[in-house]
């Protein structure tokens, strides 16, 4: 077992996060709340991202890369409104946003983040 890799929220199939060499890699975060709007689901997912980053000693200003998957790309403007309010000014990370079939039909968004650990 590799002890220099820290894994958090481990399940049989995946970990919610892995930390290695000063970088945290988050699993895809999906909505936990029952919100049906893209805005509500985006707020939910970003709160989860922020929580996971805090748990490992990082924060949203240290995001190195974000990958956003939307079930319907037509939701990008509404999602961007929430994203833009959440991102720390001057620290917007490189980002990709694509349309993708998500694992559950009620999910409208999934976000994957890589961030530097530390402040």
Image (cartoon, rainbow, N blue to C red):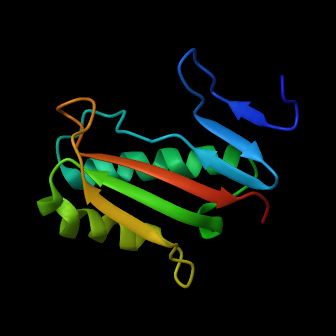
Percent coordinates x, y for residue 96 in the rendering: 38, 65
Q: Which residue is outermost to the front? A: 1
**Viewer-closest of 38 and 18:** 18
Residue 39 drawn above or below residue 76: above
- Position of 77 compared to 88: left or right? left
Q: Looking at the image, which residue is at 28% across and 70% down?
A: 81
Q: Looking at the image, which residue is at 50% across and 76% down?
A: 92
Percent coordinates x, y for residue 38 in the rendering: 21, 52
Residue 105 drawn above or below residue 76: above
Percent coordinates x, y for residue 29 in the rendering: 44, 41
Percent coordinates x, y for residue 56 in the rendering: 73, 46
Q: Looking at the image, which residue is at 28% across and 30% down?
A: 103
Classify the position of the N terminus by image quarter. top right
- Position of 12 compared to 98: left or right? right
Q: Looking at the image, which residue is at 78% across and 66% down?
A: 119
Quarter of the image where one finds residue 82? bottom left
Residue 24 drawn above or below residue 10: below
- Position of 49 compared to 82: left or right? right
Q: Which residue is outermost to the left? A: 74
């Amino acid at each position: 077992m590799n002890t220099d890799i820290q894994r958090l929220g481990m399940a049989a199939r995946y970990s919610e996060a892995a930390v290695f060499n000063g970088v945290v890699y988050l699993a895809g975060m999906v909505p936990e709340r029952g919100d049906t709007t893209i805005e509500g689901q985006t707020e939910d997912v970003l709160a989860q991202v922020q929580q996971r980053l805090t748990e490992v000693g990082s924060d949203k200003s240290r995001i190195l890369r974000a990958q956003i998957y939307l079930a319907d790309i037509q939701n990008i403007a509404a999602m961007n409104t929430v994203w833009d309010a959440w991102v720390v000014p001057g620290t917007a990370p490189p980002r990709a946003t694509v349309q993708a079939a998500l694992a559950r039909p009620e999910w409208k968004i999934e976000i994957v983040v890589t961030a530097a650990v530390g402040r």
